[in-house]
Image: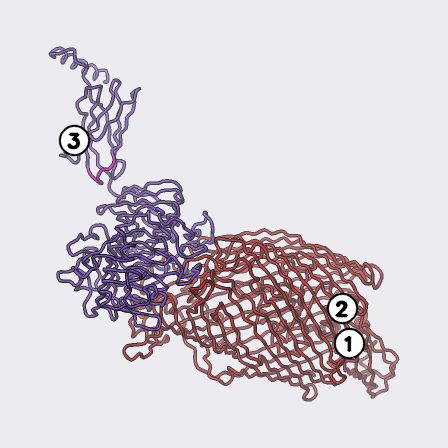
Amino acid sequence: MLRLPRLLLSLATLLAAAPALLSAQARQGRVVGRVIDASTGLGLSDVGVQVVGTTKGTATGVDGRFAVGGIDAGTVTLHLRRIGFTPKTVTGLMLEPGQALEQNIALEAATFRLTAQVVTAAAERGTVTEALDRQRTSNGVVSAVTAEQIQKSPDGNAAQAVQRVSGVTVQDGKYVYVRGLGERYTTSSLNGARVPSPEPEKRVVPLDLFPAGLLQSITTTKTFTPDQPGDFSGAQVDIKTREFPAQRAYSAQLGSGYASDATGRAVQLASGVGGERLAMAGSKRALPPLLREVGNFQGLNLSQGDKNLLVSQFRNAWSPQAATGAPNVSGSFAIGGDDPVLFGHRLGYLFSGTLSQGVDVKNDQVRALADRGTVKGSTNEIDRFEGQTTAQSVLWGGLANLSTMAGRHTRLLMNAIYNRSADHSTRIERGAFENEGIEARIQRMQYVERAVRSVQLGAEHAVGEAHLFDWTVTDARVRRDEPDRSEFVQQIERDAPSGTESLRWLSTGNGGAVRTFSTLDEANREARLNYQFSFGPFGAQHRVKTGALVRHTDRHADTRAFSINAPGAPDDVRALRPEQIFDGRFTTPGARVFDIAPLAQGGSYGARDRLAAAYLMAEWAASSRLRVVGGARAEWDRLDVDAVSTLGSPIATAKRWNDLLPSLAVTLTLPREQQLRVSASRTLARPEYRELSPIKSRDVLNGDDVQGNDQLERTRVVNLDARWEWYPHAAEVLSVAVFHKSFDRPIERVYRAAGSGTRTVFYTNARRAENLGVELEARKSLGFVADRLRSLQAFANLTVMQSRIELAPNTQASATNLRRRMVGQAPYVLNTGMTWVSRAGTASATVLYNVVGDRIDAAGDAPLPDVIERSRRVLDLSVRLPIRGALSARLDAKNLLDAPYRTTQGTVTRESYCIGRVVQAGLSWRP
Amino acid sequence: MIRLHRLAIAAVAAALAACGSDSSTAPTVTPVLGASASALSSSAVKLTFNAKSGDTGYNIERAEGAAGSFIQVGTVAAPSGGGAVSYTDANLKVSTPYRYRIISVRGSSTSSPSAELSVTTLAFGSAAAEIASDITSNRTLFADTTYTLKGFIHVANGATLTIQPGTTIRGDFNTLGSALFVLRGAKIMAVGTAEAPIVFTSSRPVGQRQAGDWGGLIIVGNAPINRSGSVEIEGSGTDGQAIVGGKNYQVLYSGGTTPTDNSGELRYVRVEFAGFAPSLNNELNSFTFAAVGSGTKVSFVNSVSGLDDSFEFFGGGFDLSYAIAYEGEDDQFDMSEGWSGRMQYLISYKSTNVPIRTGAGSYATDMQGIENDGCNGSGCDLGFDTAPFTQPVVANFTLVGAGVQSVHGAGGGFGMMLRRGTAGYYVNGVIARFPAAGISLRDAATYARAGSTPTPNLATADLAVKNVYIADAPLAFQATSATQNAFDLAGNAITFSAATTAASLFAALPAASASPAGPSAFDFTPVAGSPIATGGLSTFTGKLAAKAGTAVTGTAFLGAAAPTGPKWWLGWTNYARN
C-alpha cells in the first residue's frame, strides 16, 4: 500500500499530460529491449515499463522483452517496476524520430519487506517469481500457483491447477485436501470472499467450477493469521480472478482434444431435453408439478387411476443412445485495458469468457461391496458390477472486473463472475445383487448442473502513507441442480431350457425404475472492513491491523425421489424396453400395472448461518531481521439447521459458538536470502450443515443411508508451524517446513450401528486427533549443472505426514478401528516436474508428475478394514510454441500413464476405472 | 318418611316377637337396602352399599342371566364404624347379564337376601383410549377399551404391560409409524384366548386397511445375538435421537447376555396390517423378536397382511408354537443373527400382493416362505461363520406360496431360503406352490453347516432338512452352481412332486388366484389319502433330538396340522386383505 499514493500520483500525471500528446504524433519513435533479473540474467516477464511523462507503457513478455512505440522523440525516461524487484528509473535515453532505440535493463531483487501484495495491479501479474514472492513476503506459510504456471500446464480448471501446490491432494478431480487433511479443513474463497458450496453434503467447493482462463492465481494459505476466517485449519484456498492489463489487450484461445477412450469411439450418450449441452436444462427437467403437489404421499389414498396419472408425468427417457464420441473443444477470449472511458476518467477493465465441452469415458469400471469373511477382518466380494460411464460435460463462464480511482486516494473495484457447468452422464453396468440373489443390468442417466454467481464491490482508501482502509461487500449464490436422474434395472434371466439370456424389468422392490430430483441453493452475503496503520522508520515499519466481517449464509436443499414398480407384472410386460413400458400403454384408464412410491424421504433441510467476526493484529519489526505478528480473532456463529424427518415432524438444531482464536508468528530474516518462520495459532472447524441434520436419507440401489448428528460440536485445532526458506535466486527456492496440528473433538465420518440389511454413514466427534508432517519444496534452474541447461528449471514439492485419530467408544458408531489415520489423510503427496523455456522465451515445455499415497476413503464398518483409495501416478506434458506474430500453439497431453483409479477394502476392489489419455491442441492469439 | 319406615319395621318386629314361640332368640338381621351394582369392564362388576351397625359382614351372591341360580362368590367384612362398602367381582363373561344379592351377617345369624341387582358386563372395546406416550410403569389394558397407539410407544425397562384377552389395540394410521416397542427389561403379558384373542390392527375401518398402515409389535430381549458392536432395530432411530426422549429413538438389541431372558408371554395374539417403513427400506415387521430369550412364551400368533416380514427373529431363542402368517409382503418367517428357537406348527400362506398404504414402503423383491441368514452386517466378526449360528428347530411347517414369480419378486419364490451360513433342523414340513424352488441352500457356508454333504448326519450336522414334501414347484432345490447345493432327496426323506398341486394336499386350500373370504376358507389338515398325512419323522435323534428336547416332538405326519388333530387356527385367526 506504500505504492498506492505513488501510483495515484503517476496516474494523475498521466491524465494531465494526455491532451498534449494528441497533437504530436509525427515525430515519434520506439523503445525496445529486454528486462533481466540482475542476479540470474534470466528474462523477467511482466515488468511494467512506463515512459515517464506520457501514457505510453507496456509490460515485458515471458522472456523479458518489451517494445513501446509512439514515443515522442527527445529525452525519454523509463520507469520499470515489478513486484519483487526494486523499481528502477532509467533516464537520459535519447530517442530520434523514427528510431527504434534498444535498451536492456537489469532489475535487482528487492528485499523481502517490499510489500508486493498490497501493490494494486497496474501491470498484469503472474509469474513464478511472483508466486515465490508471495510466499516470501507473507507472514504465514503460503503457496501460490499463478496464471503463468497454469498457462504452462495442461490444467483446464482451478482444481487441476491447485494440485501443483505442495501438500495439496485433489479428490474426484474437484475437492481439495491440503496436507492430507479432510476437505472439511479447507475453505475456499473467491477474491477473498467465501464461496458457498454447491454440494449437499460437503462444505468444500468443487474447484473444477472455475475455468483456468479466468484465473490470476490460486493461493493456498496454510497458517492462520487473525485477518483470515477462523474455520480453516488445513488451508484457505483463495482463487483470484484476473485483473486488467496495463494497456488494452485482447486474447483468444481455441482448442480441441482427443480422448483415447472417447473420441471417435462408440459411446452411450444420455438423452436429454436439449439444453444440457449449455448447462441450461434444469427447468425443462424439473420435478413435474403434480408430483410436487403430492409431496411424500403420506395420508393419501391413491387410486390406480391416480397412480397411472402420476407415472405418466415423467419424461419417457430411460435409455442412453449410441453415438460416436465427439472431440473435446474449448475456447476463451479476454479483453482488458485501462482507458479513459468515463469522461476522461480512467477505468481498468477486464472481460473474459470461456467455454469448454467434452466427452469423458470411464472404462473398465468395476464397483463392488465388501462382505465380512470367515477370518476376522477378511473380506469377500459381493454385489460386483462392471460397466462404463460416459459423461458429456460443459463448463462456461465469464467475468467482468472494473476498477477506477475516485478522487486521488480511493480505488473502487467491482468484480463479477458467473460460472455454469453440467455433467450429463450415463452409466451402464451388469452384475449381481447378493441379497436378492439375482443378476441385473442397471442403466443410469444423471444430469448435474452447477452455477456460481458472485458480485463483489470494494474500495481501497489511503490516507497519507500511514493509513489504509479497505472494504468489500460480496453477494454470492450457488446452485446445484440434479433434475431428473433416472435408473432402470433389468433382471438378467436365463430361460430354461436353452439358458438364453433375457432382460426383464426388475419390476418389484423400489429400485427397478427410479426418478430423482434434487436441488441445493445457497446464498452468501458477506461484508468486510479492514483498517491498517503503518508507522516507524522506513525499512522497519510497524503495523496495526484491525477489521470486522459479517457473513450471512442461507441454504436450502431438497431431494425427492420416486420409485415406479409393477407388482405382479407378467414376463411379457417386463421384457419390454423401458421406453415401451412407459410410452403410455400402461397408464391408460383401467390399466392396472404401475405402482408408485416416494423414496429418499428426509433429503430436505435448510440452514441459516450468521457469522460475525472481528480481529486485531499487530506486526512489529523488532529489528530489520525480526518481525513478530500477533493478534487474535473473535468469531460469533449462530447456526440453525431445520429438517423434516421422514415422519413429518420438524427437527431443529441450533448451535451457538463463540470463539477466540489467538495467533503468533515470528519471521526471522537470515543472511543470504534465508528466512525462518515459526507460528502458533488456534483455529476451528465447524460441522457442515447436512451433518447436523439428524434425519436419515438414502441413496437408492444398495446405497448407504446418511444420517447427521445434531449433537456434533465444532472442532478446535491448535496449529504449530515452522518453516525455513532459502531464495538463492529470484525464481528459485528451497524450503523445509514442519507442522503439527492437534484436534480437539474432530468430526469423523464413520459407519453407524444399523440393522442387518443397511449401512448408515454417520458423523461423530472423535476424542482427539493429531497430524504431524514435513513439507519440502525446491525450485531450481539447472544452469548450475551446465550452462546449456540454464533454460531448464526443475521443481518438486513433497509432503510427508502422519495422523492419528482416536474415536470415543460410542454406541451409535460401528467402527473397526478406534485408532487409525484420519479419513482422507494421505501419508505423502509428491508433485514434481520440469520446465524448459527457449532462449527467446517464446517456446516452453513442461512435464508434471504427481503422486499421492494411499489414503482412507471411508472408515471400516466393523469388522471390515478401512476403505483405501490407492495411490495413483499422473504424468502430464505441455508444450507452447510460437507460430507467427501473436499466434502461438499449445499441445497438452494429460494422464499419459492412464493409471487406474482404485479403491479397495481388504482384498475387494470397491471401485476401479480408467479415464484414458487426452491429447489437446490449441491456438492462442495475443496481439 | 324414614321415621315412618322405622316405625313400620318396629311394629312388624314387635308383632313377630309377640306371636313368636321363643322370644329369647337374637335380634333378627335385616338385609341391606339401597345397594347398587355397576359394570366396571367387560369382566368386572362393582357393588356398593352402606353397612349397618352391628353387622359383622356380608355375603355376596351372584347368578348369571335371568334364570341362573345364585351362588356365593365372596364375602366382605363390615367396616367397624359403619359406612360405605364396595365389592368388585372380576373374571366375568363379556356382555353378560348378571344378578347379585347381598346377605347381611351378624355373628352366626344371617339376613334374608337383599333385593336383586341386575347388571350386564361391558362389551369388548366399547370404550376408547389413546396411548400417546411411553409406558414406564406397570399398566393393564382392558378388554372393554379399544386403545389407539399414537406414535412410537416404548414399554420401558422394568415395566410390565398386561393386556386382557379380547383387547383391541389399533396403530394410528394418521400418526406415522405408530408401533409398540417392548424394550429390553420390560415385559408384555398378552395372553388371550381362542374366543377372545388380543388384536393389534390398523386404526382404519375394515375394507380400507392396507399393509403398512402402522408399525408393528417389536419385542427386545436380553439374549445373545451373533453380531458384535451396536446393532439397532431396523426402522428405529430415524429421527436421530440416540437416547430416550426422541420420538423414534435408536433401539439397540445387541450385547445381550442372558439366553433365558423373559420378555413375557404372547398367546392368541394377532398383528394385522403392520409394517410401516419409518425410512426407506427400513420397514418394521408385524412381529419382531430381537434377542428375545427362552423365558418368553409365544404360541398361537397370527400375522395378517403385513408389509415386511410376518415374523422376524434376530438372535435369541425361545419356544414358539402355532404361528400362522397370512399374506406378508416379504418373508413369512425370517430368522437370523443366531436365532436358536424351537418352533413347531407353523403355517404361511402367500397368494397375492395386498395393497400397500401409500408412502409406507414397497413390496420386497425376494419374498420367501422361510428366509434364514447366519450372520449379515456389521459386527459379523467371522462373516458367515460367526457364532452362535442361526440354528432353530423348525418342525411341522406348512408353507404355501403364490406359484407366480412376479408376486414373490425377482429374487423370491423359494419355500425356504437358507443362506449366509445358517444352520438348523427343518423337519416334517410341507412346501407347496413356490415358483422358484422348494429350498435354496445358497452359499457354500450354509452347505458347510450340513457337513458339505448331500445327506447330512443328524449325529453331527448343524444343518439338516428331513422329511419334507415339496409339491407344485419347478425344482426341489435351487439349481446347483458353484455355491448352491442340493440335499439328496431319498436320503433325507424329501419327496418332490412337481405335478402334485398344493390344493390336492389339504382339506381346503383356495386357489392362488382366489380371494378367500376369511379364515374359514382354509383347512390345512391333510385331505384323506394325502401324501402328507404320513411320512413324518416320528423319532428325533442325534443333535436334533438334543436340541429339540421336549419342546418339539416328532410326528407321523408332515405339515402343521395332524390328520385328526385340532384345527388350531380356527376361531382366533383372521384372513383379510383390507
Q: Residue B149, how many percent across, how many down?
A: 35, 48
Confirm or deny contact between disc 3 and disc 1 (CB under 8 A). Answer: no
Percent position (x, y) of residue B102?
21, 26
B45 sits left or right of B219 in the view: left
**Label 2: which secondary element:** helix
Say the numbered circle drawn on residue A48. 1
**Disc on the earlier residue, 2 or 1:** 1
- Mark 3 or 2: in front is 3
Circle 3 is placed at which residue position? Answer: B70
Is residue B364 a member of the stretch shown in magenta? Answer: no
Q: Is residue B62 left or right of residue A909?
A: left
Q: CA distance from mark 3 to mark 1?
A: 121 Å
Q: Where residue A30 sits in the image (x, y, percent)?
A: 81, 85
The structure residue drawn at horizontal position 56% and vertical position 67%, both measured from the top left corner, is A855
Q: Secondary structure at mark 1?
A: strand
- Above-or-below relation of A570 to A93: above
Q: Chain of mark 1?
A: A
| Residue range (magenta) | B90-96
Nearer to the camera, A78 or B285: B285
Q: Marks 3 and 2, Cα distance to the nearest angstrom? A: 112 Å
Q: What residue did someone put label 2 on?
A: A116
Same chain for the residues at labels 3 and 1, yes or no? Answer: no
Drawing shade for chain A: red
Marks 2 & 1 on one chain: yes
